[in-house]
Amino acid sequence: MQCVVATSPALDTSQLLKGVLDIAVLAVVRDEDGYGYDVVRRLRARGLSDVGDASVYGTLRRLYQSGALTSYVVPSESGPHRKYYAINRVGRDLLANSAKAWREFSETIDNVLAADEEAA
Amino acid sequence: MTIMTNTTREAEEYLDAVRAELADLPEEERGELLEDLAQHLTDIAADESRADVPLKDLLGAPADYASELRTAAGLPSKDSRRRMKVPRPDVSAWLNNSSLGQWVNGPAGQRLLGPSLSLFRELRPAWWVLRGVLLVAVFSWPATGHPIPEVFGSRMFGLLLIGGVVALSVKVGRLGYGGWKRLVVVVDVFVVLLALTVPGPPTTSQVLWLDRPSNWDIVATHLGPVTNIYPYDAQGRPLDNVLLFDQEGRPFRVARQEQWPDGCDRVPTYPHTADGRPIEFSYPVNYTLDLEPFASLPEEHRALLEKRMADQCQQIPRPLVPLPTFPPEVTTEVEPATEPEAPPEDAPQTAP
């Protein structure tokens, strides 16, 4: 499962993910508000199978405290109230800038790799 | 049902373990994080795809979960918090953790020491009172020879002073030392040490000042220097002007007493030899009021002062001594009871 990916000797994607988890979380709440576990499942559904639950909850909390997300509570029939997170203007701007930076970065890495392959 | 109960218990244990890992965080912060986790665990329990997997496999060990949560939430790690605190030596914790402290706090120690420890606690107010009294006495005693000082010339004020210091001492004790614990401990140790080292009470209320010639040995007992000798004859009659020598034929010499209970100054007066030299080993030594300071005054002033001094100063009586019963005299030329030797006017009175 996710452990297999995390312990892969080729590339530790869990380390990579730490740097860009903010973008991923902002992206999955951009279209629809979500609560913690909901966000975890959406990220996994989109392919981030090795994302840690605690990382997602921590990231949501940090983004909320930095003002990129707003929060509201909805009564839940299965237990305590659910805390929903919604993106706001600050969050959208942050997502736009971060996404741009990520694309440039990944493009650069792609170019590096392509040049390397051509040389080989 | 069983699975449900197990799951709930597992969730509670997990929650408790994470709570312990976050113990250093501010109360509000920790509360919100744990609230999120409680909801998280409920959601996992409701998720059928993950329901049967143990939480530790799903989320990692509680310590790892807490650490990951801190990193993602931008909170300081547990270790860095610990390092930020400057370690302070905690003496009482060290004592409690030592093997002696563990024994004292253990069941055996409590059984053995418990009663005396609680007695010690109950006796603390007594120490507060004693501390107040000692705090005054340790200064008063060496200076005046009396535990109650004379304030403005009166022992009543001295007692009031002691009362005030006792009240203060009790007040400090009841406050549990406040922020002055170290100072109070220092004062306690100081008072106890001083009280233990202050010399014991003088055997009489008179303080002795010795002026001791180097070529004469002064007679002394284990109670202190001897300042007078009162001889009696075989019939129990007090004797005057007795010359005393030791086994080598050296004259006895006693210490000179310079302070008296009534505060008057006295000087020893000795019988004189034919050529006018004082015989200083004649006993008992007669002390007469010191009139020397008045010698230069005009006659009428001197007479007045001398009279006032005589009124104020007491006669120094012979000490009461336990005389043995003597056999009746065989030859009774003189009746001792009816014709006692008349003592000089300023000589000590005869004890009955």
Image (cartoon, rainbow, N blue to C red):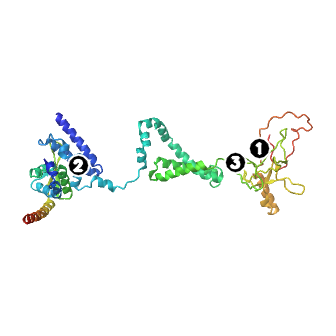
User: For the view shown, which residue lies furthest in the right direction?
Assistant: B333
How far across and down, in percent of the image, does residue A106 sit? 11, 62
| Residue in view at x 68 percent, y 47 percent | B202
Q: In which quarter of the image is residue B55?
A: top left
Image position, residue B303 (x, y; %) = 81, 58
Marks 2 and 1, the one that precedes in the sequence: 2
Residue ID for mark 3? B205
Which quadrant does the C terminus of chain B fall into? top right
- Residue ranking furthest to the left: A118
How many angstroms separate mark 2 from mark 1 (CA)? 91 Å
Give SS at disc 1: loop
Q: Do labels 3 and 1 share a chain?
A: yes
Please give left or right for residue B311 compared with residue B123 in the image.
right
Spatial separation of the CA atoms under disc 3 and disc 1: 14 Å
Foreground: disc 3 or disc 2 = 2
Secondary structure found at label 3 = loop
Q: Mark 2–mark 1 contact, CB under 8 Å?
A: no
- Quarter the N terminus of chain B occupies: top left
Using the image as rendered, state which of residue A74 and residue B209 is in the foreground.
Answer: B209
Crowding at label 1, few (<14), some or many (≥20) Cα neighbours within 10 Å?
few
* Label ID, residue B64: 2
Q: Kindly identify the residue that appears in the image at 16 percent across and 55 percent down.
A: A12
Q: Horizontal placement of B279 versus B119: left or right?
A: right
Q: Which amino acid does label 1 sit on?
A: Pro
Do marks 3 and 2 both belong to one polypeptide chain?
yes
**Label 1: which residue?**
B319
